[in-house]
Amino acid sequence: MTEPVSASTRTLVKNLSALDDGPVTVSGWVDTVRDQKKVQFVVLRDESGAVQLVNPRTDDTVEVAETISGLAQGSFITVTGELKHDERVKLGGIEVKLATLEVVTAAIPETPIAADSGIDKRMDWRFLDLRRPEQNLVFRVQTTLEHAWRTYWVEHDFIEIHTPKLMASASESRAELFEVEYFETKAYLSQSPQFFKQMAQPAGFGKVFEVGPAFRADPSFTSRHATEFTSVDAEISWIDSHEDVMQLHEELMVAGLRAVKEKHGEEIKALFDVDIEVPTHPFPRIPLAEAKEIVASRGYVVPREDDDMDPEGERQIAAYVKETYGHDFVFLTDYAASIRPFYHMRNAGDETITNSYDLVYNGVEISTGAQREHRVEVLIEQAKEKGLDPEELGFYLDFFRYGVPPHGGFGMGLSRVLMLMLHQTNLREVVYLFRGPTRLTP
């Protein structure tokens, strides 16, 4: 046994190749063991990669050999040994010849999930599922993406806000609300920071952003819905139309994808067989009515009674944009007022449509944005049209009674962006811990 390793003496696997041959200490978990008669091999994996450990069986290595023979996959170990560069070693061209091995924590030999386990079973044992290199990469990509977005916002003088997630009333509608006990009354989990990020506009903040949780009591079991998700929101003052919001949105997406490609592009290609494409801007823009005509000309008529697009329509228009413009993104604009919230501004030339858009990425909608209505008398009338009681919206309407600039913004699902970027078929693959209608653990 050896003294516990400290963070200062431990070397990450990713840094081994840059070192000269010589003594090293590495720590991680056991990925595989090959226990042969004359030599033993252990693949040790840490948060940065994997390395091969080798232990020739000799009279001097009996104790280490016995320890290796009893190792279960997943056990966390610390080893010291001699680093050796050898191009014959398939795993990175390096290996560590063992001197000492300490079992920090031993794993149960029988693992509950395997490579071919179904997604529900893997979600039951998510902490083990997350040990896969692909999963590790997902969350490093997420970190880089969010950092790139924050860098963009900060460099453009945005203010970060953190809005409450307990609401006295609905932020958009009473549909899909989670109700919770709140002392002597009821509260609701926030569906969106919409009202509060708008509140920053009469407060004079100008430009704000938030990355935080949102909740929807949606009983959907689709591959792209969740009851709790991370919402990426921005709101800006002094806009002329939703075009200003779209320009912000596309610049943000370009900045994020460029950062991901630069830092992780090669690894994403190796593990997901996906080439990250940094889009050009401006992104294509197509009014919704025109998009429906294009989709119909491709042989698909959207079978909805309302004026909205459906998932297959989104896939079809995305295919058209890819074929025509070579682009993975498309803004669908000018949505009908009948299917938009009361706070979306109506088009000055056509009251039946709104100054709003949906952003579609690789065939799936990831965001809704719009210019907001800032005239209180118009807001009241539009709320009434939607069957809402202005009295219940009193605190929100007060924002507009004391002066507010023209403004707009968007809300976007972080996990949808990751899912589509990495060409995954299910949201659960890119969410640290998923929450859905039947999933509250782990």
Image (cartoon, rainbow, N blue to C red):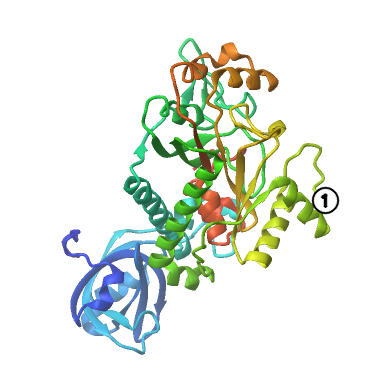
- How many numbered dots are placed on residues in this image? 1
- Check disc 1 and give the amino acid type: Val
Q: Quadrant of the N terminus?
A: bottom left
Q: Nearer the viewer, residue 54 or 20?
A: 20
Which residue is at a point 35% across and 46% down the rendered structure image?
156
Image height of 292 relative to 395, above or below: below
Q: Nearer the viewer, residue 293 or 70?
A: 293
Task: Determine if residue 431 is in view.
Answer: no
Which residue is at a point 36% across and 52% down the rendered structure image?
147
Image height of 31 relative to 299, above or below: below
Q: Nearer the viewer, residue 369 or 361?
A: 369
Callout 1 environment at 10 Å: few (<14), some (14 to 19), or many (20+)? some
Image height of 177 relative to 314, above or below: above
Q: Would you say 186 lies left or right of 74 here? A: right
Give how far across and how far down residue 85 sits, in percent. 27, 85
Give how far across and how far down residue 113 sits, in percent. 53, 58
Which residue is at a point 56% across and 28% down the rendered structure image?
373
Q: Would you say 136 lies left or right of 362 here? A: left
Give how far across and how far down residue 172 sits, in percent. 58, 27
Task: Determine if residue 363 is in view.
Answer: yes
Q: Nearer the viewer, residue 55 or 366?
A: 366
Which residue is at a point 31% across and 73% down the rendered structure image?
66
Q: Would you say 191 lies left or right of 80 here? A: right
Image height of 166 relative to 328, above or below: above
Q: Would you say 114 lies left or right of 321 here? A: left
- Element at label 1: loop
Quarter assignment of residue 349: top right
Quarter assignment of residue 162: top left
Give how far across and how far down residue 77 sits, in percent. 30, 64
In the picture of the structure, the residue carrying the numbered disc 1 is 301
